[in-house]
Amino acid sequence: MTCIAGWVEGATVWMGADSAISHAYMLRESTESKLVRRNGILFGVAGDTRAKAILAHNLEIPARKKSQVAEAFIAIELVNAIRVAFKESGMHTRKDEHESVGVTLLIAYESKLYIVGGSYAVYRTRDNFAAIGSGAELASGALYALKDYEIKPRERLTLALRAAAHFNPYVAKPFVITSL
């Protein structure tokens, strides 16, 4: 359980994550961030914590083709590489011809946010923000309510994560916030 929230401001993407890790009825504070930065891509990981290690250390990030638009690179090249890395690491499952993984990703790339669901579907929203994890609805509501206020991105994400932590028992401080 977690909350990862992202905010796009101009050419910069900001992303924040909580530090809660949970198992059954136990909640602990992680010593590691749920955010991974590699090759100009920022990943936020909600779900199985092993996925973060795979993205940080095992994922072979493909080269983007010169004529390829960012959306195609993320949805085809990068997600296929993620699928292969998860499959090789034993995280990937297949049932009735459907592939899935117990992870949702928030990806920042070239001033945009992408959500990758457990079935490897990639999508973007019309908003300049997105959130994933068990606190996603709470953080999204806070970001929407604050969207017309002049607030620095770091403070905006902190407020959204605080709202999620206040109402969701599986979201907790400290918060890690970074930009790309």
Image (spheres, grey):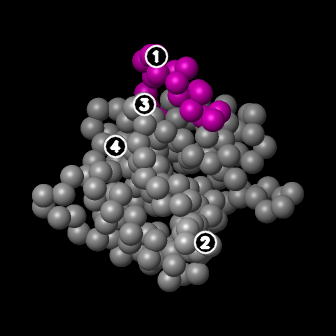
| Residue 140 on the magenta segment | yes
Considering depth in this image, is 111 or 85 the residue closer to the camera?
Answer: 85
As measured in the structure, the alpha-carbon distance from the residue carrying label 2 to the one carrying label 4 is 33 Å
Q: Amino acid at mark 3?
A: Asp
Q: How many marks?
A: 4
**Secondary structure mostly seen in the magenta stretch:** helix
Quadrant of residue 76 in the image?
bottom left
As measured in the structure, the alpha-carbon distance from the residue carrying label 1 to the one carrying label 4 is 21 Å
Whichever of callouts 2 and 4 sits on the residue coming sooner in the sequence is: 2
Q: Is residue 64 left or right of residue 132?
A: left
Q: For the point 48% across and 61% down, which residue is it? A: 120
As measured in the structure, the alpha-carbon distance from the residue carrying label 2 to the one carrying label 3 is 34 Å
- Dot 2, crowdedness within 10 Å: few (<14), some or many (≥20)? few
Q: Specify start and end residues of the magenta stretch as a single range.
A: 137-154
Which residue, given by chain and number where applicable, does mark 3 sit on? Answer: 127
Badge nearest the viewer, 1 or 4: 4
Q: Amino acid at mark 1?
A: Tyr
Tell me: residue 30, above or below residue 97: above
Badge nearest the viewer, 1 or 2: 2
Tell me: residue 14, above or below residue 143: below
Badge nearest the viewer, 2 or 4: 2
Looking at the rendered structure, the secondary structure element under dot 4 is strand
Which residue, given by chain and number where applicable, does mark 4 sit on? Answer: 112
